[in-house]
Amino acid sequence: MKLHFLGANRQVTGSRYVLDVAGKQIMIDCGLFQERPYLGRNWNPCPVGAKNIDVMLLTHAHIDHSGLIPRFVKEGFRGKIITTEPTVALADVMLRDSAQIQAEDAEYKRKRHAREGRKAKYAEEPLYSEQDAVDAIKLLAGVKYKTQVQVTDAVTAVFHDAGHILGSSMIELVAKENGKATRIVFSGDVGQWNKPIIEDPSLLDRADYVIMESTYGDRLHEQGGDIGSQLETIVKETRLRGGNVVIPTFATERAQELMYFFGKLVHAGRLPLIKVFLDSPMALDISAVFLKFQAYFDDEMRRMLTSSTPPLQFPGLTMCRTADQSKAINHVQEPSIIMSSSGMCNAGRIKHHLKNNIERADSTILFVGHQGDGTLGSQILRGDREVRIFNQMYRVRAKIAQIFGFSAHADKAGLLKWLTSFQPKPKNVFLTHGDESSAMSLASHIEKVVGWPAHVPRYQEVVELG
């Protein structure tokens, strides 16, 4: 039995594994590489070969776990893709959106390279088309948590709630080969405990091998206090100045969490009547998926939805889908809250709202998520006095604020809490989905403090299990 590590190895994105067992090949995740040094891997054929994979299992819908599936289908994969029911619906939205982004990026490259008279490093065609995404979506098959699924004749799978985003899962495999059963657990992305809307991460107790993410494996989350109180203070202070609160928002989970907190504040009378705009077509589609799968919410959220003060609906909230609705926000005179994607400000409608507010000393730009190196969001957050938006320089005069506590990933303490629930200790722990320094730091801690074996694989490394 062999396990191939084909992504998210000593870097964060591009999660992808292949398990060879009893003459079949099972792929777990097929994510897009998003860090600049690794973008070329998206264009390379899968080292194992798309036509050789019998079936795929998907932990969740985030693009760094699912975004290469349409390309994989384009290369010839025709097997079933098994995942949770909410993930099927989320992937339908997110893969179509990703295909649109691929097309827009390719068109931008063509124009830029023609203007500069140089040849592109990568093909000036989209990584995949919307039709490729549609073809991929047709292969998705949804299952419920804690239900045993026969993946191949020799392998069964159970999807457990990872508490990361709606429908996210950790996958427990039992693989039988040569008369021996081996239990392998893929963590997916482990969420935080006591987060709103969704359940806490599942704790499992048995595994021969564990493949665990290590995104925050070398640090603890910064504690900034109660999220609702921080939002209340920022909004009230900005409103007194007469400005807008502009929030770069990730469409999946973060937009819904913000609606949850603002809803609680409005229903409790802690915020004055104020217009709140959610300006992101994708976030609207994702929110519709959330409401469709309320059975996957935690108990508190389900109770709130049936109360007279449902958190995802509240006075003052306006959903903006069309471009005209988005542009109309610019003409609103009174102070407002504007939530818009993308979360790192590198694309989407948020750039228009930044352009209109970043030079206003009365407005606040509020960050509620990680800002990747080199993104517009990171430049604003680190204190750059001028930033480029739509090829024009703007002075940063708005107040810049940040709220911690929204992260959907467990930190070092959370990862160790999840890992040490396995008793007895696994034969080996493989750390993936984290920068090299983060993964290596966590591996050292597991070996020296926990006393378990841990290994940080390299890209395309193959290990024997058994």
Image (cartoon, rainbow, N blue to C red):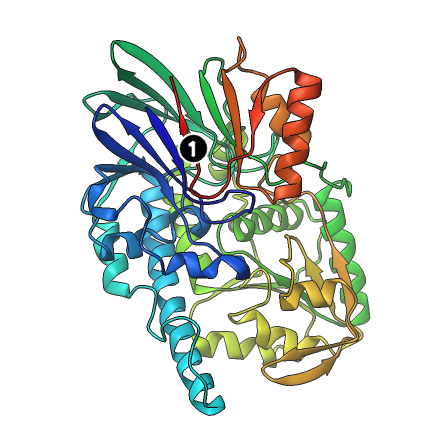
> Is 15 situated above or below 63?
above
Choose between 94 and 255: the one closer to the eye. Answer: 94
Numbered disc 1: secondary structure? strand
- Quarter of the picture containing the C terminus is top left
Q: What residue is pinned by disc 1? A: 169
Q: Position of residue 170 (x, y in %)?
A: 44, 30
Specify the quadrant of the image occupied by residue 169: top left
* Residue 291 seen anywhere in this rendered image of the structure: yes
Give the residue type at disc 1: Ser
From the viewer's perspective, tell me whether residue 455 is left or right of residue 459. Answer: right
Q: Position of residue 224 (x, y in %)?
A: 77, 43
From the viewer's perspective, tell me whether residue 267 is left or right of residue 379. Answer: left
* Residue 84 seen anywhere in this rendered image of the structure: no
> Is 344 situated above or below 409?
below
From the viewer's perspective, tell me whether residue 32 is left or right of residue 231. Answer: left
Choose between 273 and 117: the one closer to the eye. Answer: 117
- Quarter of the picture containing the N terminus is top left
Mark 1: give few (<14), some (14-19) or many (20+) Cα within 10 Å.
many
From the viewer's perspective, tell me whether residue 64 is left or right of residue 144. Answer: right
Choose between 300 and 27: the one closer to the eye. Answer: 27
Identify the residue at horizontal 69%, vertical 84% (top origin).
393
